Amino acid sequence: SAVISQKPSRDICQRGTSLTIQCQVDSQVTMMFWYRQQPGQSLTLIATANQGSEATYESGFVIDKFPISRPNLTFSTLTVSNMSPEDSSIYLCSVVLADVRNINYEQYFGPGTRLTVT
Amino acid sequence: GENVGLHLPTLSVQEGDNSIINCAYSNSASDYFIWYKQESGKGPQFIIDIRSNMDKRQGQRVTVLLNKTVKHLSLQIAATQPGDSAVYFCAENIRAAGNKLTFGGGTRVLVKP
């Protein structure tokens, strides 16, 4: 497995401001993702964080709202821009680890960042 | 397709009994499935996975069954313990499409002492 840490673990922010969430992995990984989990709901993929190129966003998510950086194979950031109360969610970083035979691709999640926008 | 659950179904289980959590997945092209456990205040924790060329896989106290005919996945937990109380999510994946997971709505498991 991988050890994934996120900063901050939680924050309370005012509407109209932006928050950058950091994700650090203890080993080099090929694939990193950002998910959102709204209160009481399941997880929704925001984007794939690509190392050295622009992130790939899922339908309903745009770069201007959720800019993502991935400068290397162990680190990524997600920014939630111009926040509104509807952005209150848990934001989760995820990585894929392939086993040595490249048969299974286990995906692991960080602890999440709990964001409340007032 | 996506499946975001607005209401989490709850499974109440007596400690020591077996639990069965069910999941209907949406995409017949999905070829890899994972079960996650999420405890309050934590991120999802990988439990067990199964590839589409298998119909059963066993781990420690857990078994995943896959029925591709009806697009159904289940997680069986043997001798359920209080520490098993959590929300359980199934996730489906098409690895050729980039390992992006689509999550089911989740089931809350409450273990009664």
Image (cartoon, helix red, strand yellow):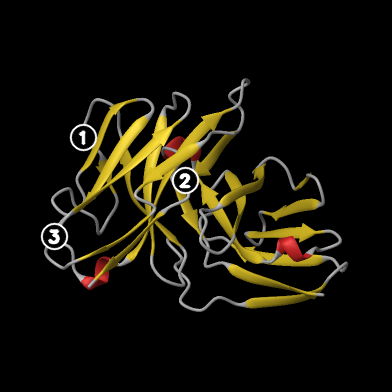
- C-alpha distance separating marks 2 and 1: 22 Å
Query: In the rendered image, which residue does mark 2 sit on?
Result: A110
- Disc nearer the start of the sequence (2/1): 1
Residue B1 visible at all: no
Percent coordinates x, y for residue A83 in the rendering: 18, 63
Badge count: 3
| SS label for mark 1 | loop
Percent coordinates x, y for residue A55 in the rendering: 25, 38
- C-alpha distance separating marks 1 and 3: 23 Å
- Asked which quadrant contains residue A104, the reply is top right
Amino acid on which disc 2 is placed: Gly
Query: In the rendered image, which residue does mark 3 sit on?
Result: A17
Give the residue displayed 56% in from the left and 60% down from the top: B25
Q: How many C-alpha atoms fall within 10 Å of the one at disc 3: few (<14), some, or many (≥20)?
A: few
- Disc nearer the start of the sequence (1/3): 3
Q: How many C-alpha atoms fall within 10 Å of the one at disc 1: few (<14), some, or many (≥20)?
A: some
Q: Is residue A34 left or right of residue A96?
A: left
Give the residue displayed 51% in from the left and 53% down from the top: B43
Q: Chain of mark 3?
A: A
For residue A54, the mark is 1
